[in-house]
Image (spheres, rainbow, N blue to C red):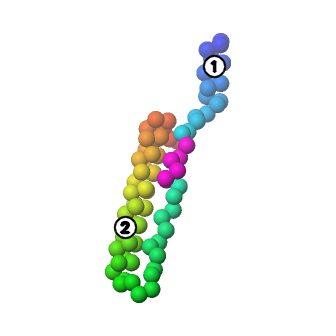
Amino acid sequence: MNRAATTKGHAAAGVLLPPLPTDLRKQEPHAPIVEGQPLISILARERQALKRANARQGRTVQFYDELAARYGTSP
């Protein structure tokens, strides 16, 4: 009976998820536009920002996939 009560208590407590890494909440700003600067350099900085944002999104997906593998997903 104690074992059943313990199991019931664990089920009712739910799952404690680890905290989301701080990096995954970060928003990537646009490259600043500096007057007189060639447009190609602005485009290059925008592409670098996009690469950082895509890498962060990839880490977010990996984080979620690890959680889903560990705890399962809702039906």
Q: Label 1 crowding class (10 Å Cα cut-off): few <14, some 14-19, many 20+?
A: few
Residue at left offset 49%, top offset 36%: 71
Residue at left offset 65%, top offset 30%: 12
Q: Position of residue 2 (x, y in %)?
A: 65, 13
For the residue marked with disc 2, what is the amino acid? Gln
Of 68 and 62, nearer the camera is 62
- Mark 1 secondary-structure assignment: helix
Span colored in magenta: 19-24
On whether residue 61 falls in the magenta region, the answer is no
* Quadrant location of the N terminus in the rendered image: top right
Say left or right for 3 vs 39: right
Of 34 and 47, nearer the camera is 34
State the CA–CA distance, disc 2 to disc 1. 52 Å
Residue at left offset 45%, top offset 51%: 60
- Mark 2 secondary-structure assignment: helix
Of 24 and 1, nearer the camera is 24
Instruction: Kindly identify which residue carries mark 2.
Output: 48
Residue 6 image label: 1
Determine whether 52 is above or below 47 in the image: above
Image quadrant in which you'd find residue 49: bottom left
Determine whether 69 is above or below 50 in the image: above
On whether residue 20 falls in the magenta region, the answer is yes
Q: Position of residue 70 (x, y in %)?
A: 46, 35
Say left or right for 56 vs 14: left
Say left or right for 17 vs 59: right
